[in-house]
Image: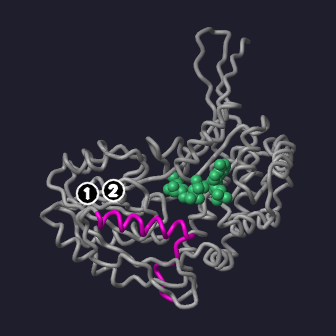
Amino acid sequence: MPKCGESETRDAIGAASDAWGAWRAKTAAERGSLIAGLAGLMRRDTDRLAELMTLEQGKPLAEARGEIAYALSFLDWSAEEAKRVYGDVVPASAPDKRILALRQPVGVTAIITPWNFPSAMITRKLGPALAAGCTAVVKPAEDTPLSAIAIGELAVEAGFPPGVINIVTGDPRAIGGAMLDDERVRKISFTGSTPVGRLLMEQASKHLLRLSLELGGHAPFIVFEDADMDRAVESAVACKFRNAGQTCICANRFYVHESVHDRFVERFGAAMEGLKVGNGMGEGVNIGPLINDAGIEKVEEHVADAVSKGAKVVRGGRRASVEGCVDRFFQPTLITGMTPDMRVATDETFGPVAPVAAFSSEEEVVRLANDSEYGLAAYFFTDNASRVMRVSETLEYGIVGVNDGGPSTAQAPFGGVKHSGLGREGGKYAMDEYTELKYVSWRL
Ligand code: NAP
């Protein structure tokens, strides 16, 4: 991969800036058709793209295929939504006046994405940005540049004009610094950790850039006494162990009502028996390696910290060795006796570790769930309809899964509150992030 820095980033911004005028002048249908074309090519090449993703990122092949389908769904949706970027004609206060509110593209957009969803985090931004009439400079994570370049190659094949989509790989500080220091960039859309998001927000103040920040999370997963236990266990497995626990909306801490705690732990542990750790290219593998050494060391530290503070490891708790592969696999791990002072209860673990605590009342568990600097996703399981509304409204999270451990979908507004970020991605809501509202006051 090329190691780009400041000068290559400036060149890419120049190309995006030069291409912007012609791109925004295209009709929405023309832009939509190119975006749909890219989605079609990704669909055609799903197997190849998924294999590439598994080889560079490690997630099991079936999950990689799922991610390509998820990634292209943002392009499909945005291709259609391009035609619905409406403005308003507002009733005026004088008979000889007309008030128009026009939606216009913000301009050159800088996109910075993480390694855990190497394709979908790009298309979730690129789709609405392009649909709105923006051009883009994309900086993928250093751990997963190949999936990004593959999308770029398909964009060329789809017929996107030069300069509309640019990809720069390399040094994050140099590239990010150049993006934020350049007046031609009007918007930055970032998905990644909260510390880097905070840094970018500070740097964005120089040119008062518009910001979308999709940051870290620390999702509580609550099982009430009246929950459907089968559904809760099945969702816990999917929500915790997808991508080896390396997702921003992964369940990070489990709170289970004391009357069903032991039953849940037993059933959850039994379900984990069926998870196969291994090379993501292997048949039937559910859990691949963690992304890098720092990633697995953090998981080990979280488990050791929990044990030192009195937690009990019910299953797993150690690295797993996989023949012929790097030493970066971790056993699916179940821990009981989680307390609020443990790191697993406050920091993103980003690994296949499920810590559980018992609770006794709704009020107590909502307080525990909200006692976090993060506010991305939260889950709860209950069959009580009044509780569904009450708890959904009280949880301080951008996304709430009710009896549902997999809420992500292209048409829904995805995003967090508190230290989990700013703005929403997905569906019609995403278009607001890439458009400015211009007010035209017209005296006849
Ligand atoms: P990260 O370290 O913040 O990196 C994210 C991106 O920012 C990467 O492309 C990284 O480049 C780049 N970067 C790092 N330092 C930078 C700087 N000083 N200036 C400009 N760019 C910089 O996060 P990560 O470890 O890759 O991803 C995991 C995090 O992302 C977790 O916290 C997770 O919760 C969050 N996440 C959030 C969402 C969401 O939708 N809310 C979705 C997925 C992930 P390099 O890779 O080259 O260092």
Q: Are marks 1 and 2 in contact (CB under 8 Å)?
A: yes
Report the residue at 72% width, 63% height from top: 38
- Which disc, if any, is residue 28? none
* Number of other residues with Cα within 10 Å of mark 1, as a class: few under 14, some 14 to 19, many 20 or more: some
Q: Is residue 411 visible?
A: no
For the residue pair 209 and 128, the one nearer the viewer reads as 209
The answer to which quarter of the image holds residue 443 is top right
Report the residue at 49% width, 78% height from top: 329
Residue 208, image x, y percentages: 67, 30
Residue denoted by label 1: 339
- For label 1, being within 8 Å of ligand 1 is answered no
Would you say residue 2 sits in the magenta stretch?
no
Residue denoted by label 2: 345
Ligand 1 quadrant in view: bottom right
The majority secondary structure of the magenta stretch comes to: helix
Residue 298, image x, y percentages: 46, 64
Residue 9, image x, y percentages: 80, 50
